[in-house]
Image: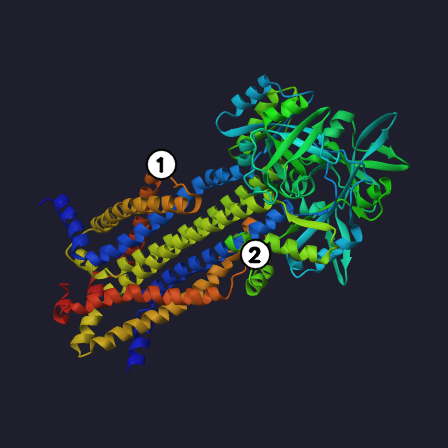
C-alpha cells in the first residue's frame, strides 16, 4: 500500500467509522448550503414575481391622441411595441344626456377587456327589482355606482341621448371603483360608435415588467407615436418602484444576515469537533506523520463532507425555493444551475477554514501532552 | 454531588461550552431578527405606501353626476354639491385617528387666466400642500405632500398661505408657462413657483392653495373631494362581509379592525350625512394584495431560516455530546444510572440553551434594528413575546439535538467506549 492509497483509506475510514461525527458535520454544511441556495434563488426571482403581481394594478400608461382619434395604424403600432407583454384597450368618451337631460359621461370599450384590466372593480348585479328581461335589442351597459343610483336606481332599463340619436341601455352590472369611473357608463365599442360616430382617442395600456423595462417601453412608444401623448400613471409606477426596491433590499439584508450567522454557526460546530479530535492528531504525529500529511487528511475529510453536503443542500434549497414561490406567488421559483458552483465551492472553502484553523492550535501542543490528557 | 458535577463540567470544559453557546446564540439571533422583520415588514411597507398614495376618498352626495373627461371638469363650478372645509378636521377625531396619516382636500373649477397678453382657459385646482391644522389640542400638518408622494415638482412647492401656484406639466408645455410667470384671474394674481407632474388630471391644470382657489371660484369653505391616507389592514374574507347583516359581536369586531371599509364607515359617522366615504379600490385592493404577498414571502423565508437554525443548533449539541462518550462510559462504569446521566446532560443543555437564547435575543434585537434602519430608515420593534419564543425554541432544539446523541452514547458498553473502540 503506497502513501496515496493509505491516505484515501484513512480518509474513508475516518468518515465512515465515526459516522455520527461525520453526520453532524454533513448536516451543518447541508444546512448552510440549503439556506444559501434558498436565499439567493428567492432574491434573484423576487423582482420578477412582484412585477407579475403588479399586472393587477391595471393600465400603467395612458396614450392620448393630441388631435382627433387614435387611428388603427397608431393602435397597431402600440400593440407591436409592447408585444405580448401587456395589453392595449382603446377607450372613447363622450358626454350624453341621461333620461332627465342631465349630462353623463359615456365610455365605449370592449367591456370584457375593460373588466379584466380593472380587476379591482367590485362588480355587483344591479338591484333586480324591476329588472326587465335582458332583451337582445338593448345594449348592455356597465354602470358606475353613482351613475346607477341616479340613472337606474331600481335596476331598470333606461335611455341616453347623444345629439339626435337615442340608445336604450340594459344595466348588466354595477361597478364600484372609488374613482371617477363611478360616475360613468360604459357601453360596447360598436354601440358607442353607432351612437356618437367617434372613435377612441385614448388607449389604456398595461405594460408588464420592471420599472426600467416599463420606462424603456414608454420611450419606444413615444418614438413610434409622435402624434400622441404618452403618460405613465405615476401613482402606479412609483408604487411599483418603491415596493420593489424595499422588498429586494429587505430580502437581501435578511438573507445575508441569516446566511452569515448560519455559516458562523457551522464554523463553530466544525471547529469544535476538530478540536475534539486532538487525540487522533496526537496519535498520527506520534506515529511519525508530518504536519502536511495530517493537514491533508483533515482537509480531505472536510472536502469530502462539504461536497456531499453542498450537493444535498443545493437540491434541498432549490426545492424549498420552488415551494416558497408556489405557496406564495402561485408559481414556483425555478432552480438556478448557475448557483451550484458557488455553493459547492463556498462550502469547500468554509469547511477547509473551519477544519484547518484549529489544527494550528493543536500543533503548538506536544503530542505526548495531548495523549497524557493535558 | 449533581450540582458539583454540573459546575465542574462547565469549569473544565469552558472551550467546548463556549462553542456550543456561540452556535446557539447565532441560531437564536437569526430567529429573533427574522421573526421581528417578518412581523414588522407589512406595517413598514404599508406606512411607506401610504405616504405615496391615498386610499380613501370623500365625495359629496349629489343629485347629479360628475362630468369629467381627461381632467376637464365640464360641470359648471357652482353646480355641484360640496363638502365643508371646516368639517374636515373631524377626520382626525375618529376612533382610528392614529391610522389617519393625512388628508388632502381638492376643489376645482374652470377659469380663464391671463398670462402677459395671452389668455388661457383651464382648470384651477385648489388643495393643501402642507397645511398646519389644529384639532383640539393636537396640531398636525397635512396635504398632498403627505398623501400624494408621487407628485413631482420641478421648482419649489408653494406655501399654503401664499398666492403661489404650480402649473401642470402638460399645461405648461402647451401654454408656454415657466417658473416665475404670473397668471391673472379676476383680480387674483398667481405666482408660478413650480411645474407639477402627476400623470393625472393635475398635469393639465393650475394647482393653487385651497383658500386662493375658494376665493377665485367664489366658493368659500367649499371642497369638492378629499383624499385620505389611512393605514389599513388588507381585506380578508371577514372584511368583505356586509356589515349590515353581521351579528352585533361580529359587527363590533369589524368596526374595531382597521379595514378600509370600517375606517371609511367611522369617518362618514363624524361628517355630515351629505358625503360619501369610499376606498380607492385601485390603490387599496391591489396594494393590500402586494403587501400580503410580501409578508407571506418573508414568513416563508423566516420558517426556512428557523428550520435551518434549529438544525444547526441540534447539530452542535449532538456534536458536543458525541465527543463526550468516554465521559458517559466513565460515569456509567462508576455506577451512575441512566437517569442521572441523562439529567446531567440535559441540565447542561438547558443552561446552554437559556444562556445562548438570551445572548441570541439581544444580538437579534440589534440586528433587527440595523435591518430596519438600513432598509426603511426607521427601527424595527421586537415584540417581547419573541424572547419567550426564542427561549422555548432554544430549549426544544438543544434537547432534541442532545437526546438522540445521549441515547446513542448510553447504548454502548462502557468498557468498549473507554477502550476507545466505539
> Is the same chain shared between marks 1 and 2?
no
Q: Position of residue A309 (x, y in %)?
A: 27, 48
* Number of residue marks: 2
Residue B193 x/y as whole percent: 79, 37
Label 1 packing within 10 angstroms: few (<14), some (14-19), many (20+) = few
Which residue is more in the foreground, B17 or A297? B17
Q: Would you say the residues marked 1 and 2 are in contact, meaning their CB atoms lie under 8 Å apart?
A: no
Q: Horizontal and vertical percent for residue B270?
A: 72, 58
Q: Residues within 10 Å of mark 2 (few under 14, many from 20)?
A: some
Quadrant in which the C terminus of chain B appears:
bottom left
Q: Element type at marker 2?
A: loop
Question: Does residue B308 appear left or right of residue A156 in this picture?
Answer: left
Task: Please state which of residues B149 and A312 is positioned toward the viewer in this rendering.
Answer: B149
Locate residue B119: give its quadrant: top right
Instruction: Inspect this view and state whether residue A200 appears.
Output: no
Q: Residue at x 74, y 57 (%)?
A: B90
Between residues A119 and A172, which one lies in front from this camera angle? A172
Vertical placement of residue A86 versus A53, above or below? above
Q: Residue furthest bottom?
A: B1
The quarter of the rendered structure image containing the N terminus of chain B is bottom left
- Name the foreground residue: A31 vs B172: B172
The residue singled out by tag 1 in the image is: A338
Q: Is residue A170 left or right of residue A263?
A: right
- Local secondary structure at mark 1: helix
Q: Is residue B208 above or below residue B347?
A: above
Residue denoted by label 2: B379
- The residue shown at (19%, 56%) is A19
Residue sitting at the far right = B187
> Label 1, label 2: how many angstroms apart (C-alpha)?
35 Å
- On residue B119, the disc is none
The disc numbered 2 marks a residue on which chain? B
Amino acid at each position: 500500500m503506497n502513501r496515496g492509497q493509505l491516505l484515501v483509506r484513512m480518509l474513508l475510514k475516518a468518515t465512515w467509522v465515526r459516522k455520527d461525527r461525520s453526520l453532524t458535520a454533513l448536516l451543518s454544511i447541508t444546512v448552510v448550503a440549503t439556506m444559501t441556495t434558498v436565499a439567493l434563488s428567492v432574491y434573484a426571482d423576487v423582482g420578477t414575481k412582484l412585477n407579475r403581481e403588479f399586472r393587477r394594478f391595471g393600465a400603467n400608461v395612458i396614450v392620448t391622441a393630441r388631435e382627433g382619434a387614435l387611428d388603427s395604424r397608431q393602435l397597431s403600432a402600440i400593440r407591436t411595441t409592447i408585444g405580448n407583454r401587456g395589453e392595449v384597450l382603446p377607450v372613447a368618451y363622450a358626454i350624453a344626456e341621461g333620461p332627465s337631460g342631465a349630462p353623463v359621461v359615456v365610455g365605449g370599450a370592449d367591456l370584457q377587456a375593460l373588466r379584466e384590466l380593472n380587476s379591482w372593480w367590485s362588480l355587483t348585479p344591479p338591484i333586480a327589482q324591476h329588472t326587465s328581461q335582458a332583451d337582445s335589442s338593448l345594449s348592455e351597459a356597465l354602470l358606475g355606482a353613482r351613475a346607477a343610483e341616479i340613472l337606474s336606481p331600481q335596476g331598470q332599463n333606461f335611455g341616453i341621448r347623444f345629439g339626435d340619436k337615442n340608445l336604450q341601455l340594459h344595466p348588466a352590472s354595477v361597478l364600484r371603483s372609488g374613482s371617477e369611473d363611478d360616475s360613468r357608463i360604459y357601453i360596447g365599442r360598436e354601440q358607442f360608435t353607432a351612437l356618437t360616430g367617434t372613435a377612441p382617442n385614448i388607449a389604456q395600456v398595461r405594460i408588464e415588467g420592471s420599472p426600467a423595462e416599463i420606462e424603456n417601453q414608454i420611450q419606444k412608444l413615444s418614438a413610434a407615436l409622435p402624434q400622441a401623448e404618452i403618460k405613465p400613471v405615476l401613482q402606479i409606477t412609483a408604487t411599483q418602484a418603491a415596493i420593489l426596491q424595499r422588498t429586494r433590499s429587505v430580502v437581501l439584508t435578511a438573507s445575508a444576515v441569516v446566511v452569515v450567522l448560519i455559516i458562523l454557526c457551522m464554523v463553530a460546530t466544525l471547529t469544535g469537533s476538530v478540536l475534539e479530535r486532538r487525540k487522533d492528531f496526537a496519535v498520527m504525529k506520534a506515529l511519525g506523520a508530518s504536519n502536511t500529511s495530517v493537514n491533508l487528511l483533515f482537509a480531505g475529510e472536510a472536502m469530502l463532507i462539504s461536497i456531499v453536503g453542498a450537493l444535498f443542500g443545493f437540491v434541498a434549497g432549490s426545492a424549498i425555493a420552488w415551494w416558497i414561490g408556489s405557496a406564495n406567488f402561485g408559481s414556483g421559483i425555478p432552480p438556478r444551475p448557475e448557483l451550484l458552483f458557488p455553493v459547492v465551492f463556498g462550502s469547500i472553502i468554509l469547511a477547509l477554514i473551519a477544519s484547518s484553523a484549529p489544527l494550528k492550535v493543536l500543533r503548538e501542543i506536544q503530542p505526548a501532552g495531548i495523549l497524557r490528557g493535558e | 454531588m449533581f450540582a458539583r458535577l454540573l459546575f465542574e463540567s462547565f469549569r473544565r470544559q469552558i472551550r467546548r461550552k463556549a462553542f456550543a453557546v456561540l452556535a446557539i446564540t447565532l441560531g437564536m439571533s437569526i430567529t429573533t431578527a427574522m421573526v421581528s422583520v417578518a412581523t414588522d415588514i407589512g406595517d413598514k411597507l404599508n406606512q411607506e405606501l401610504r405616504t405615496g398614495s391615498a386610499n380613501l376618498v370623500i365625495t359629496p352626495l349629489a343629485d347629479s353626476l360628475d362630468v369629467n373627461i381627461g381632467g376637464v371638469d365640464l360641470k359648471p363650478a357652482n353646480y355641484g354639491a360640496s363638502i365643508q372645509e371646516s368639517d374636515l378636521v373631524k377626520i382626525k377625531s375618529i376612533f382610528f385617528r392614529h391610522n389617519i396619516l393625512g388628508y388632502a382636500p381638492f376643489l376645482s373649477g374652470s377659469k380663464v387666466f391671463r398670462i402677459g397678453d395671452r389668455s388661457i382657459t383651464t382648470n384651477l385646482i385648489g388643495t393643501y400642500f402642507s397645511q398646519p391644522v389644529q384639532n383640539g389640542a393636537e396640531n398636525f400638518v397635512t396635504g398632498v405632500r403627505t398623501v400624494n408622494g408621487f407628485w413631482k415638482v420641478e421648482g419649489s412647492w408653494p406655501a399654503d398661505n401664499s398666492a403661489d401656484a404650480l402649473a401642470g406639466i402638460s399645461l405648461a408645455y402647451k401654454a408656454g408657462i415657466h417658473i416665475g410667470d404670473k397668471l391673472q384671474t379676476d383680480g387674483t394674481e398667481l405666482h408660478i413657483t413650480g411645474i407639477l407632474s402627476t400623470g393625472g388630471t393635475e398635469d393639465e391644470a393650475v394647482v393653487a392653495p385651497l383658500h386662493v382657489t375658494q376665493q377665485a371660484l367664489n366658493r368659500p369653505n367649499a371642497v369638492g373631494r378629499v383624499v385620505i391616507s389611512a393605514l389599513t389592514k388588507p381585506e380578508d374574507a371577514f372584511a368583505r362581509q356586509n356589515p349590515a347583516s353581521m351579528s352585533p359581536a361580529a359587527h363590533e369586531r369589524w368596526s374595531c379592525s382597521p379595514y378600509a371599509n370600517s375606517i371609511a364607515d367611522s369617518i362618514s359617522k363624524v361628517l355630515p350625512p351629505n358625503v360619501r366615504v369610499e376606498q380607492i379600490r385601485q390603490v387599496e385592493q391591489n396594494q393590500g394584495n402586494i403587501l400580503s404577498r410580501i409578508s407571506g414571502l418573508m414568513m416563508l423565508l423566516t420558517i426556512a431560516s428557523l428550520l435551518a437554525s434549529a438544525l444547526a443548533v441540534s447539530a452542535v449539541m449532538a456534536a458536543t455530546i458525541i465527543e463526550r462518550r468516554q465521559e458517559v462510559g466513565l460515569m456509567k462504569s462508576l455506577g451512575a444510572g441512566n437517569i442521572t446521566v441523562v439529567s446531567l446532560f440535559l441540565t447542561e443543555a438547558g443552561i446552554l440553551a437559556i444562556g445562548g437564547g438570551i445572548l441570541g435575543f439581544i444580538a437579534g434585537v440589534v440586528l433587527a434594528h440595523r435591518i430596519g434602519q438600513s432598509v426603511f430608515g426607521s427601527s424595527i420593534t421586537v415584540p417581547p413575546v419573541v424572547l419567550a419564543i426564542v427561549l422555548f425554541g432554544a430549549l426544544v432544539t438543544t434537547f432534541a439535538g442532545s437526546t438522540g446523541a445521549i441515547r446513542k452514547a448510553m447504548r454502548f458498553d462502557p468498557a468498549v467506549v473507554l477502550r476507545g473502540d466505539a
